Image: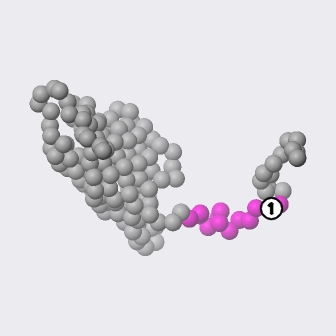
Amino acid sequence: MYRPYTSPAGNTPSSSDVETTIRSLSQDFCTAFNTGNYDQGAVLFGADGVFMAPHLEPVIGPKAIERKLREFGEAGYQDLRVETLRVDCSGDMAMELGRYNVTILSEHGAKQIDRGKFLKVWRRIGAWRMMADCWSSNLPASLPNSVAQKSIPVTEKITIINNDVPKSA
């Protein structure tokens, strides 16, 4: 059974204090994103914090994260809402698990709601900072129309076993 780590050091906040702090910081992140203050959202990450969005390469560090958040905002992502389902902590580390929804406004004005889940790792470095933020959509993955409509010519099909490999009995 999991038991939270208790520090021998005095003045250690209780796990309920940590949970309240983490929940509050997550709401601060949403507020910063929804108001276009991407720098304020990125400052919640540690110096080597990692932002891992679905189908994209991870970005590391507050400046790169700020640029990526701005890209999402400019792509029509808005009205981010998060619900923290669980916070576990041990010493200066905490894990937050939850779900999110965000509205994506297309160029033509159509709205799509994306719902999914997230996992964040927090570390207390003086203040609590995100060390990793990973999220994934519950929507089925889809290929862009240009890729989905393209058929693969016979010459581009993948060879499962190379002809150079000796055949065994």
Task: Name the residue furthest front.
Answer: 1
User: How has the structure been colored for display?
Assistant: one colour
Is 7 in front, or is 111? 7
Give residue 162's position: percent from left, percent from top: 83, 46
Residue drawn at (39%, 68%) of the image: 113
Is 15 in front, or is 154? 15
Give residue 148's position: percent from left, percent from top: 65, 66
* Location of residue 43 (image quadrant): top left
* Location of residue 122 (image quadrant): top left
Give residue 163's position: percent from left, percent from top: 88, 46
The disc labelled 1 sits on which kind of residue? Pro
Is 116 in front, or is 10? 10
The answer to whether residue 115 is left or right of residue 143 is left
Residue drawn at (44%, 60%) of the image: 137
Residue that badge 1 annotates = 153
Residue drawn at (41%, 44%) of the image: 51
CA neighbours of label 1 inside 10 A, class few (<14), some (14 to 19), many (20+): few
Q: Is residue 4 visible?
A: yes
Q: Secondary structure at mark 1?
A: loop
Type of secondary structure dominating the magenta stretch: loop
Say whether residue 152 is magenta.
yes
The answer to whether residue 83 is left or right of residue 166 is left
Say whether residue 66 is magenta.
no
Q: Is residue 32 visible?
A: no
- Location of the N terminus by quadrant is top left
**Magenta span:** 142-154
Residue drawn at (35%, 32%) of the image: 47
Is 26 in front, or is 161? 161
* Location of residue 82 (image quadrant): bottom left
Give residue 92's position: percent from left, percent from top: 25, 33
